[in-house]
Image (cartoon, rainbow, N blue to C red):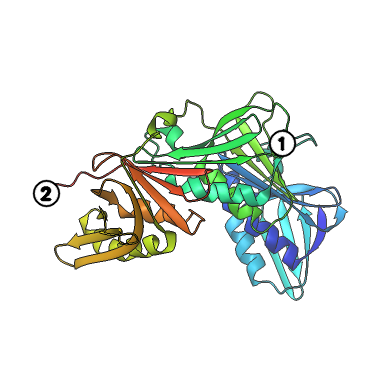
Amino acid sequence: MKVSCLHENITKGLSIVGRAVASRSTLPVLGNILLSTDKSGLKLSATNLEMSITCWIGAKVHEEGSTTLPAKTFIDLIGTLPKERIDFELDASTETMHVTCAEFTNEIKCIGSDEFPVLPSVDGNHDLEINVSNLREMIDQVVFVAATDDSRPVLTGVEVKIEKGQLSFAAADGFRLAVCRSSLSTTDDTQIGVIIPARGLAELARVIGDHKDPVSITIPPGGGQVIFRVNDVELVCQLIEGSFPDYQQLLPDSYLTRVVMSTDKFLGACRAAQIFAREASYAVTLSVKSGKGPGEDRLEVSANAAETGSNESSIESSLEGDPVDIVFNVRYLTEVLRVIGTPNVALETNGEASPGVLRPVGRDDFVSVIMPMHVGR
């Protein structure tokens, strides 16, 4: 194997695939990055067996071949080299990669590529394409809701469904739920129902970054995996087996209280309250108050900590229904309000012991449900 490439190309490729390298594994090769010649260029791959990322970069191939290099050593070394052409030459007899750049000469001990797991790849056919901006927004709206512990594996993932030209994402952790939907440009009868690890989707959002081209999605025959492809990057996720909870029953079809206010002002009030709520299990009280005349309804956000002090904000709002006091985890509120994406937000509830439903005003493609906290008084 003998290859030359620009410093900026290999740096970009490593920044993409490096995030899929296994941090701890009994298999040493999973701590390595696969380098192989492919289509007159260079292919970089990394995997932790749950997620794999492959990136193709421009390079001049003198001799074909492949090997795996220890990720940390490789990435750290490239970061110290001048921004010039880098030459790679593999000594197959000793499995040693010679890396030269300007006046720098280095040798890296490798592990043979035959020990690296075989990664699936798109053969040119894909199930559907999704507008990249829609996909990025949908990922941002749900991934933070997924559970982070593995006691219920299905809750660490995002349910992705495609049916009748509609794409929906849903995530829940037992205390909150987020659901978003988008219309697809395709009009075929494609139907998909899978659970994708939230960590994989979060990584996909980083990979697509500012790309403008559509993202293709492929589920190979036999299931078990989903493959995303955008430009010269391919991300493979192992699907989570199991049935996602039926969340439709958590979405109330009516309310006793609906209050509408500025998203930014509500978010600002929650951020201020969170400073004081940290010592009180992040509990904040939302008090919906009816005014005497038009434009005088208020939403009061308050937090109280015995050692730190207290905080209260009053926000102009529009009330429909009954006044109510309800306690929520303020972290859940701030995380949802950051992704609402509309100037105004509506909070709906059926009482202090009922969930709070947050909806962007003017859009019906997103909804979040947050369970109330029960605080002794």
In this rendering, position of residue 270 left or right of residue 207: left
Residue under label 2 = 377
In this rendering, position of residue 257 left or right of residue 238: left
Q: Residue furthest top?
A: 222
Residue under label 1 = 128
Who is closer to the viewer here, 138 or 206?
138
Q: Residue 12 at x, y = what percent? A: 69, 61
In this rendering, position of residue 292 left or right of residue 171: left
Is residue 221 at least partly visible in the picture? yes
Residue for point 43% across, 59% down: 263
Q: Amino acid at mark 1?
A: Leu
Q: Residue 32 at x, y = what percent? A: 62, 50
Q: Residue 82 at x, y = what percent? A: 71, 74
Q: Is residue 140 above or below residue 266?
A: above
Q: Quadrant of residue 79?
A: bottom right
Q: Is residue 50 above or below residue 13?
A: above
Secondary structure at badge 2 equals loop
Is residue 70 at least partly visible in the picture? no
Q: How many marks?
A: 2
Q: Residues within 10 Å of mark 1 (few under 14, many from 20)?
A: some
Q: Quadrant of residue 14?
A: bottom right
Q: Amino acid at mark 2?
A: Arg
Secondary structure at badge 1 equals strand
Residue for point 43% across, 27% down: 246
Which comes sooner in the sequence, label 2 or label 1? 1
Q: Residue 221 at x, y = what percent? A: 69, 25
Quick check: marks 2 and 1 in contact, CB under 8 Å?
no
In this rendering, position of residue 253 left or right of residue 114: left
Indicate which disc residue 136 carries.
none
Q: Residue furthest left?
A: 377
Residue for point 28% across, 44% down: 372
Q: CA distance from mark 2 to mark 1?
A: 53 Å
